[in-house]
Image (cartoon, rainbow, N blue to C red):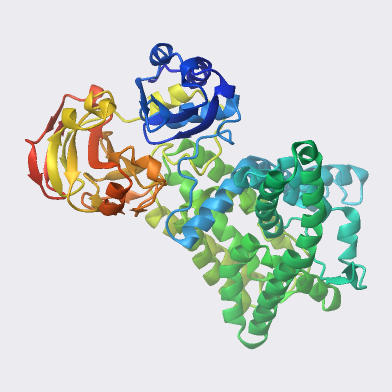
Amino acid sequence: MASVDYRKTAEEILANVGGEANVSGLTHCATRLRLKLRDESKADTAAVERIPGVITVMKAGGQYQVVIGNNVPKVYAALGEISKLTGDTASDEDTGPKGSLLNQFIQLISSIFLPVLWPLSGAGLFKAGLAAATTFKWISDASTTYIILNAAADALFNFLPIFLAVTAAKRFKANQFTSMAIAGALVYPSIVALNTVGTPVEFFGIPVVMMSYVSSVIPIIVGVWLQSYLERGLNKVLPDWLRNFMTPLITIALMVPFILITIGPVTTIAAKGVSSGVNWLFATAPWLAGAVMGAGWQVFVLFGLHWGLVPIMLNDLSTQGYTLLGGPLPAAVLAQAAAALAIALRTKSAKRRDIATAGSLSGFVAGVTEPVIYGVNLPLKKPFYFGCVGGAIGGMIAALGGSANDQFVFPSLLGLAGYMNHGSFVMQLIGCAVAIGIAFALTFLFGPREQADEVTDVLPDPVVDEDAATASTTPTATGTLSLGSPVAGELVALGDVPDKVFASGAMGSGFGIRPTDGSIVAPCDGDVVVAMKTGHAFGIKNDHGIEVLVHVGIDTVQMKGEGFAPQVAKGDRVTKGQVLCTIDLTKVAEAGYDPTTVVVVTNSDKLTEVTPAVAGPVAAGADACVVVA
């Protein structure tokens, strides 16, 4: 399908099923679009089957199923761009929570921050250039020129909650403009001023503990999440003639004070707890405090808890002329930038390399690490951990030297000038060098080895020719591969599988298994390139470009994950025999679905031979098919 125009395919499918008005629901599984049509007689099935990129059409389970194959997410994404059917503008088969709570949190944060990564990176470089200009006295920071340029460079960071309101609203399916209004209230000048007035703040007699929401992250994300539930509830109970204006009115009126009264104070209390603990450590064990600050600073920033430390730093600067709390911070920041630089040098993903290169430069020069944290290090996990390790050791060295900053500067290479006048500047430089070296070396040697542009769910997609990109990055299949059975049971010929699409070979050559066990294992080594959140289908690509689809059960996507427990996620590396998921065969039977598991080589047309074993009993992992490229 290298020459298929997915947007045109989507437009033609929509037109030939009776238009958007005739579609009451749209989802997709590993291979097909699943539409619920209001009037199936309006669909021209013959015309749909003639559309480039469409394999066939099936009607089952009250659904109109358009079989696309491996590229169904691209058609689904295109439908999102031309209609309101998907509720989004991009395919999202992997956005559902999976794995540990940490994995779920990382997926959530990444999806919210991804759209603003490039602007953050650009603004960070802008700030770096402006800082250099003032450091070298090219521009006076008292001039109106500086004021204008600083506003341009700093606006994104200052009003970050408003930008995050948009992306969080998209994630949580809330009204984006209502979310922006809520975020705008949090950074409204008079609300910001209440944080410094020094007098008690009340809302109808309820005490309000104020905090700064400028550049904050957690309050608006939690607020928009709650907003989404409130809106859905209001839309159900309000009559049509009131809904359009009363839903946003009530939502804004309730959510703004609710965030100020509850979410803000909770964040403030958590921040004060962190700052008190860290300050105590500096008084009793400076080396330990340096390690904690060096390891934890970027974690604090991640949760917005660093705002509890900023007032202490400012107070120290005004009362004693320096702050020890700032001593370990350059190591913490530069270590994350170094980890991202290592990824930029070793990754095969052009998208990842672009953002890691620009983001690491922004981190090194300006101390702005958001682009690399949310776009590189945190999604890949290990680089973030390695950065924390480097920051801990470098921060400890800086703290042992008594290093402190006597200016409120961003911890960065440019900001090191603010650390020259208190404590040992040499120890500060050594700490930074050690932090950079450790984070870079650990990431370069032990960090994830990404394939060329295969991790697409954690990076923003630039405007490129998808077909050209696919053609240039997909490896040519080579070698011989022995596929194991993904489950114990009875091996059957593909033609005997009770699904006409698989049985016809339209999806590729392969075989079926009537399972006697509920443990589904990988038929080969490779990278997981498809992992449906329902746990019913997995796509694996081996190192030689052979693509294998494991589809558990017939039409089991309708079970919506009930009885399925996926054990791997997209982007994972699996070995032959590793458990992909477990299924409850009893629940599948009770739901009325056939548990036959299908294994097909989806790029069979590019291979020399795909030869399944003879039908009969087979054990999980036993050789079931030979593939010759």
Image height of 50 relative to 464, above or below: above
Write the residue at 69% across / 76% down: 275
Write the residue at 86% across / 65% down: 195
Residue closest to the eye, 270 or 496? 496
Image height of 430 relative to 347, above or below: below
Whether residue 133 is visible to the viewer of this picture, yes or no, is no
Quadrant of the image containing the C terminus: top left
Seen as rendered, the residue at the extreme bottom is 284
Q: Position of residue 113 (x, y in %)?
A: 61, 47
Whether residue 77 is visible to the viewer of this picture, yes or no, is yes
Q: Position of residue 220 (x, y in %)?
A: 71, 55
Residue closest to the eye, 484 or 308? 484
Write the residue at 41% across / 38% down: 454
Q: Position of residue 91 (x, y in %)?
A: 50, 35
Quadrant of the image containing the N terminus: top left
229 lies left or right of 35: right
The image quadrant of residue 117 is: top right
